[in-house]
Amino acid sequence: MTRFLVFLIAAYVIYYLFKNSLKSKAPGNTTQHPPDKKTDVAATRLKEIAYVFYSAAKDGNTCDVCMSLDGMHILPDHKMLHRIKPPHSDCKSTQGCRCTLVYVTRDEEGSREIESLLKRCGGMCDRNTLDKERMGR
Ligand SMILES: [Zn+2]
Ligand SMILES: [Zn+2]
């Protein structure tokens, strides 16, 4: 009988320790720390980005909507960035929208010049207007 009791107590202790280790693992590792780090990384990346430009596939299957947005330059914090973000729903291409946004960082040559030009244009500008602005200087 005492052997059985000892066995029961031991089983209970093991169960209790196991439960505690599960508890302490869950909040520490998965929920608290990673999200904070992620937002920090996202914020610093956003600071490094000088501008974003829109790039369409530019082949026979690229529709007018995508073509008109091709070469559009925009500042990374501009509110229009979310509206022009591909793939867009009104694309008429049979292959669907294959456009991408190209993120250009500040360490790339000439990126700061384009960034300051974009600021003068109100944060968003197409390629032709940008070229004209650069020629006019
Ligand atoms: Zn399209
Ligand atoms: Zn597209």
Image (tube, rainbow, N blue to C red):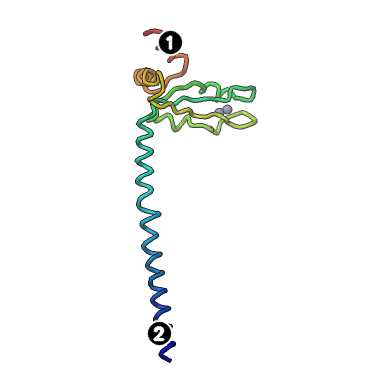
Quadrant of the image occupied by residue 5? bottom left
- Judge whether 121 appears above or below 103 on screen: above
Q: Amino acid at mark 1?
A: Lys
| Residue position marked by numbered label 1 in the rendering | 132
**In the image shown, does 11 or 119 lie closer to the viewer?**
11
Q: Amino acid at mark 2?
A: Val
Q: Secondary structure at mark 2?
A: helix
Quadrant of the image occupied by residue 135? top left
Near mark 1 (Cα within 10 A), the count class, few <14, some 14-19 or many ≥20, is few
Q: Quadrant of the C terminus?
A: top left
Q: Residue furthest bottom?
A: 1
Q: Residue furthest top?
A: 136
Residue 95 percent location from the top left of the image: 63, 31
**What is the distance, in whole Å, between disc 1 and disc 2 at their CAs?**
87 Å
Q: Quadrant of the N terminus?
A: bottom left
Q: Residue furthest front?
A: 3
Q: Which mark is residue 21?
A: none
Q: Earlier in the sequence, mark 1 or mark 2?
A: 2
**In the image shown, does 90 or 24 lie closer to the viewer?**
24
Residue 39 percent location from the top left of the image: 36, 42
Q: Secondary structure at mark 1?
A: helix
Q: Residue at x 38, y 71 (%)?
A: 17
Label 2 beta carbon within 8 A of ligand 2 = no
Ligand 1 found in image quarter: top right
| Residue position marked by numbered label 2 in the rendering | 6
- Judge whether 92 appears above or below 121 on screen: below
Residue 49 percent location from the top left of the image: 39, 29
